[in-house]
Image (cartoon, grey):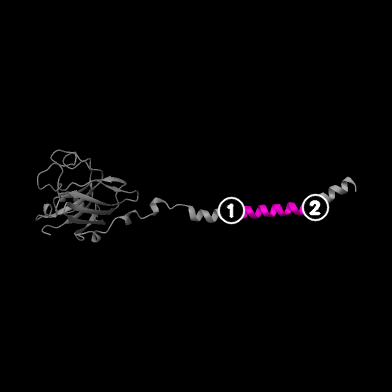
Amino acid sequence: MTHKTQLAVIMALSLPLIACQSYAGQSADTSMDMGMQEGASDTVPNSPHDEERHDQIMALDDLPGGAGLEGTFLNTDGEEAGTVMLQETPNGLLVRVDVMGVEEGFHGVHLHETGLCEPEEGFTTAGGHAAPNGNSHGFRVDGGPHAGDLPNGFAHRDGHLRTDLFGSGTMLADLQDSDGFAVMVHSGADDYESQPSGDAGSRVACAAFEGGM
């Protein structure tokens, strides 16, 4: 057998093997690609913003003592912007704020002395912070805080502020005089020390509660 004949025989025998290897490789690549695509849909984590953060907050009806009082927030255009619920506990007042349309960040939330929310007046008709004992404003101040002082609430980037706040030692009797009271959300954070209201900025949402409730 000549050298050329031997080479031709080797090539003829090798071609089917090469073809089989090539097909097997393509099949493996295709299977891997399909597996990666299928796996991608199963393993890509949900964004934290896709989860409902607020499901972790219990309804006030589920807490001992019942739902207490509920009011509606108005924004500066006079439109409904959310709700607030208050529940008296043995140690103070639980305040659940759920308001939309505020800027991302921390916001002062206070209990004001008058239950009158007039948007055209910038909610100034609600008066100052409830302070029936004449205390100063702020958790960081000697002689503070007001009965109406609460911790800041945080609004997420969607403009939704939903949180539970607690007024230690504050009772509904401290608020429910003849002219009622209001829950106020401010444009900025309370610094817990500036007088008379923590330098918390303008009033952006207000919920009124009538007197004698």
Q: Residue at x 60, y 55 (%)?
A: 31
The relative height of residue 208 versus residue 197 in the rendered view (above or below) is: below
Q: Is residue 176 left or right of residue 61?
A: left
**Frontmost residue, 111 versus 64:** 64
Q: Position of residue 154 (x, y in %)?
A: 29, 47
Label 1 Cα crowd, 10 Å radius (few <14 / some 14-19 / many 20+): few
**Quadrant including the C terminus:** bottom left
Residue highlighted by disc 1: 33
Percent across and percent down for residue 2 are 90, 47
Q: Nearer the viewer, residue 117 or 129?
A: 129
Write the residue at 20% across / 55% down: 207
- Give the extent of the magenta segment: 15-32
Q: Amino acid at mark 1?
A: Asp
Residue farthest along the right direction in this orientation: 1
Q: Is residue 160 left or right of residue 68?
A: right
Q: Report the predominant secondary structure element of the magenta stretch.
A: helix
Q: Which residue is mark 2?
A: 13
Q: Secondary structure at mark 1?
A: helix
| Residue 74 picture location, percent across and down | 23, 55
- Which of 146/2 is in front? 2
In space, the residues marked 1 and 2 are separated at their CA atoms by: 32 Å
In percent of width and height, residue 155 lies at 30, 48
Location of residue 212 (image quadrant)? bottom left
Q: Is residue 109 magenta?
A: no
Q: Residue at x 50, y 55 (%)?
A: 41
Which tag, 1 or 2, sits closer to the chain's start? 2
Residue 34 occupies quadrant: bottom right
